[in-house]
Image (cartoon, helix red, strand yellow):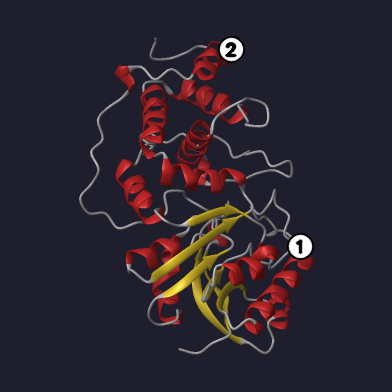
Amino acid sequence: MPAAVSSRAALRPQLDKRPLRAAHLRVVSEPQVARPAPFLKWVGGKGKLLPALRPLMPKGKFRYAEPFLGGGAVFFDLRAEDRLEHALLCDVGRDLVGACKVVRDALPDLLAQLTAHEAQYLAMDEENRALYFYAVRNRHPADFVMDDVERAARMLFLNRTCFNGLWRENRSGRFNAPHGRYANPGIVQADKLHAASRALQGVDVRQADFRALPELVQDQRIEFVYLDPPYHPLSTTSSFNAYSGGQFSGKAQAELADVCRRLDRQGVRFLLSNSDCGFVRELYRGFDVGTIRAARSINCKADSRGDIDEVVVRNYAN
């Protein structure tokens, strides 16, 4: 097979057949020690905020739920600290939930697919890398038959080679971020995937809307919930979010606040993050509402980046 292709048409049959030739594969040994961390780069990920969030968490071990999983930074941090007796992770995104299940249950097959992607992509020049990226992007699961592993490999490949590592879907639920043009993107990241797979063992991962949370919490005897919903926009020009094709309205924010009140009545502790604005503060009046400083880095204008306040809402005190 040539190292590069000259047209999208020449590339498509290669993707349809998805060959995994021995020359594309390399032996990846499982690391002895690796701290679990998000294996996807996600908008609004909480990795940099963990030092501020940790002191707000309940003490000791608990049965945990997270209904807006995203990259899962808080879950992986709690897992690394051996804080979880049980974990329920939910999201409405089918690709995200499916990728987590594949990392948990079928990691060797996923590594093989990612290794094939990496070998083919890195061997190409810049023009043909872009062709390869858009061919994978256009191969949407709604239009092509693909198994769970192929679908997860598609998601991880696109996440690691798209512009800014931003998983972004349009209102039809189709990924639409452009090509990133990185010189040497880390497509496989085997150590990170092995660590994530170990952390996800025994964890209940499911596709579910946040409105189902009270029943799920009751069924699984959850004691603590962390909620990181799409943030309420601070202006009309900052309304992007990645929830269910970009739909998370003020009405949904109000419904989420009602869910939190139900959790409170059920005796379940919760911690919620959101943007610091009057609308959010009014929704959670009566709870403990504090602020933390967060870096805002995803913006096309450099002068619009910087630290901003975020609210944290709790129904308990440490």
Q: Residue at x 46, y 48 (%)?
A: 40
- Give neighbour class at mark 2: few <14, some 14-19, many 20+ (Cα, 10 Å): few
**In contact (CB < 8 Å): disc 2 and disc 1:** no
Of the two numbered discs 2 and 1 on the same chain, state the one appearing first in sequence: 2
In-front residue for pair 177/120 = 120
Residue under pointer 2 = 9
* Kind of element beneath mark 1: loop
Residue sticking out furthest to the front? 219
Q: Residue at x 57, y 36 (%)?
A: 178
Counting from the top left corner in percent of width and height, residue 292 is at 50, 78
Q: Image height check: is 173 above or below 77? A: above
In-front residue for pair 250/297 = 250
Counting from the top left corner in percent of width and height, residue 199 is at 37, 56
Residue under pointer 1 = 249
Identity of the amino acid at label 1?
Ser
- Distance between the Cα atoms at labels 2 and 1? 40 Å
In-front residue for pair 163/22 = 22
For residue 148, the mark is none
Q: Which image quadrant: the N terminus? A: top left
| Whether residue 37 can be seen here | no
Residue sticking out furthest to the right? 251
Q: Residue at x 64, y 78 (%)?
A: 263
Give left or right: position of 160 versus 278: left
Quarter holding residue 66: bottom right
* Kind of element beneath mark 2: helix
| Whether residue 53 can be seen here | yes
Quarter holding residue 105: top left
Identity of the amino acid at label 2?
Ala
Q: Image height check: is 274 above or below 187? A: below
Label tally: 2
